[in-house]
């Protein structure tokens, strides 16, 4: 589904991502972990076209999106969330989902003018579904900026869903959540998978990653140091060294 | 109606167009110091169409709006890569270029023994369409106000539509809008062109009410005012810029006992509001609260849902 081929991104002399290779298979939950500054968020930003890579290729669903702009990557079927919550705070929950319905499918379904006016009735009714999915139905008219932290995180996931993605990239969706919220997120990720959506999960909360992912790639200093199933990763010496800071000594 | 009042209302109408054009760009997150250029282009172009070519103002309106949209669209394309302060400076530079070009342009033709056309800093005179057609100041005011009502109506429609929300998302968080599949570049150029056309409407009416316009009418102060109207009145609804214009022209300029202090009061108002209400009197949050209050009064709120375990 998503093929990353010898992908590199240098910021000046810093190799934020360095000849990275991995492939996310259709329908799986793929974890991307690593210590702070290991290049996880940079990888997500490269895939979603926030900035172009220095070298390498990104192939999604058979389509080369290496230098595609953000709105084109969404067209291709990739939606994302942000490490620091990003919502339209001055818009209601409902509006946040409504303006996010920009999938290629929705664009094809109606002409530009009727999309400008409000989109199809079907699209609007789907907003209700996303509200249900993220348990935000009773907050629909609340301004996004007034929501509690956990609700804002849920809204971000619902918004990614509103783009009818083939794949979602979640950048630390569990950051700052308590144990119960993490458990609810776990269920929600499985629900995404059940809908046939491929998930790339960047996360620091290990209990969630080990619990929910099918496979994991571990980054350190922009390079992949390990890849495998959660149990393989847990027993990998290079990974332990990277996290405990004993490598290279 | 009292002559003084008619001229004030006509002015309020005319200047609300340029305030709305600056407001539209503010929605998309851009501060333009150059909307006076399109007001000026509107005044000159429409003046040329009616005074030199002898067409009616009704023909001049669509022609002028197209010309203004085209030139504004070009400015939008040229400034695609500029953001924030750089965009502001570029628009200001463009507006000054237009003004200086008008100062340097003389293009007159003899019509009925009179020289008519732009004449450098002497401006463009004899825009007599309203006089020639016996349209009284009172009637002209109604033409302006009805056109304003139509444009305001379209703004309200836009603000309730998805297009309005798209403009707002671009202004609120450009990158987020982009990752949500919005072609920000295309919408920005479209907004710039649209804003140019709206500003030119103000210029058309200004020229035909004044019958004589000068390049100096379209200097930086006009642009600064048009921005300030939205920032004072509020960026939550198109009523905001209208409120700003009414406060300035309807009160500060029109009421005798504050007249001498207009610029002091106006500047003070802008400064105070920027500190206490950075997005104006009718900002997004206040507009939302009003809308919700209005809605619950019309319909009872839905019964509270039983607690959803998945929500915790």
Image (cartoon, coloured by chain):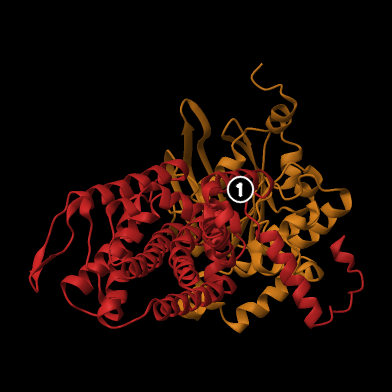
- Name the residue nearer the viewer: B11 or A87: B11
> Given the current orientation, which residue lies at the most extreme right position?
B306
Instruction: Confirm whether residue A141 shows in the render.
Output: yes
- Name the residue nearer the viewer: A182 or B181: B181
Identify which residue is drawn at 71% across, 61% down: B286
> Given the current orientation, which residue lies at the most extreme top position?
A249
At which x and y percent is residue B151? 47, 74
At which x and y percent is residue B267? 55, 45
Which hue is chain A drawn in? orange
Asked if residue B136 is positioned above or below residue B38 in the image, the reply reads below
Asked if residue B269 is positioned above or below residue A101 in the image, the reply reads above
Task: Say how many tags the image has.
Answer: 1
Secondary structure under tag 1 reads: helix
At which x and y percent is residue A106? 53, 75
- Name the residue nearer the viewer: B126 or B69: B126
Identify which residue is drawn at 42% across, 52% down: B223
In the rendered image, the quadrant that contains the C terminus of chain B is bottom right
The residue identified by callout 1 is B269
Q: Residues within 10 Å of mark 1 (few under 14, many from 20)?
A: some
What chain does badge 1 belong to? B
Q: The red chain is which one?
A: B
Identify which residue is drawn at 84% across, 81% down: B300
At which x and y percent is residue A68? 43, 54
Q: In which quarter of the image is residue A125?
A: bottom right
């Amino acid at each position: 589904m998503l093929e990353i081929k010898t992908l590199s991104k240098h910021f000046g002399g810093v190799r934020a991502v360095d000849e990275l290779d991995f492939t996310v298979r259709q329908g799986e939950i793929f974890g991307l972990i690593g210590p702070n500054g290991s290049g996880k968020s940079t990888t997500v930003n490269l895939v979603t076209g926030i900035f172009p890579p220095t070298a390498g290729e990104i192939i999604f669903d058979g389509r080369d999106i290496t230098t595609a702009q953000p709105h084109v990557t969404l067209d291709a079927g990739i939606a994302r969330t942000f490490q620091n919550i990003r919502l339209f705070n001055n818009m209601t929950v409902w509006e946040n989902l409504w303006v996010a319905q920009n999938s290629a499918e929705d664009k094809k379904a109606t002409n530009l003018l009727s999309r400008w006016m409000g989109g199809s009735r079907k699209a609007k009714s789907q907003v209700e579904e996303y509200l249900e999915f993220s348990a935000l139905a009773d907050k629909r008219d609340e301004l996004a900026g007034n929501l509690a932290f956990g609700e804002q995180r849920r809204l971000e996931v619902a918004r990614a869903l509103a783009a009818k993605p083939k794949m979602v990239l979640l950048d630390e969706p569990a950051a700052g959540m308590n144990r119960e919220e993490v458990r609810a997120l776990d269920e929600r990720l499985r629900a995404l998978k059940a809908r046939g959506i491929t998930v790339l999960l960047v996360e620091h909360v290990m209990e969630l990653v080990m619990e929910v992912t099918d496979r994991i790639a571990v980054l350190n200093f922009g390079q992949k140091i390990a890849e495998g199933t959660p149990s393989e990763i847990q027993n990998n010496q290079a990974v332990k060294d990277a996290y405990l800071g004993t490598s290279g000594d | 109606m009292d002559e003084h009042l008619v001229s004030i209302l006509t002015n309020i109408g005319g200047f609300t167009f340029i305030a709305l054009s600056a407001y539209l760009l503010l929605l998309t997150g851009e501060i333009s110091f150059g909307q006076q250029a399109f007001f000026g282009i509107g005044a000159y172009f429409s003046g040329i169409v009616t005074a030199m070519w002898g067409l009616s103002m009704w023909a001049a309106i669509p022609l002028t709006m197209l010309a203004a949209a085209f030139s504004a669209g070009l400015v939008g394309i040229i400034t695609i890569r500029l953001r924030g302060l750089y965009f502001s400076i570029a628009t200001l530079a463009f507006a000054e270029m237009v003004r200086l070009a008008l100062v340097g342009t003389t293009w007159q033709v003899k019509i009925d023994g009179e020289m008519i056309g732009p004449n450098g800093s002497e401006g463009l005179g004899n825009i007599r369409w309203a006089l020639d057609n016996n349209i009284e100041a009172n009637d002209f005011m109604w033409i302006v106000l009805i056109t304003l009502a139509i444009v305001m109506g379209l703004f309200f429609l836009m603000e309730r539509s998805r297009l309005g929300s798209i403009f707002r998302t671009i202004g609120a968080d450009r990158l987020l809008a982009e990752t949500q599949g919005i072609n920000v570049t295309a919408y920005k150029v479209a907004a710039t062109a649209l804003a140019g056309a709206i500003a030119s409407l103000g210029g058309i009416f200004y020229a035909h009410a004044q019958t004589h316009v000068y390049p100096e009418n379209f200097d930086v102060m006009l642009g600064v005012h048009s921005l300030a109207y939205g920032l004072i009145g509020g960026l939550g609804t198109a009523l905001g810029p209208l409120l700003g214009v009414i406060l300035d022209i309807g009160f500060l300029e029109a009421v005798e006992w504050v007249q001498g202090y207009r610029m002091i009061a106006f500047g003070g108002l802008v400064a105070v509001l920027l500190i206490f209400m950075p997005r104006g009197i009718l900002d997004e949050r206040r507009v939302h609260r009003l809308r919700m209050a209005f809605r619950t009064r019309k319909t009872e709120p839905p019964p509270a849902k039983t607690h959803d375990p998945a929500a915790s």
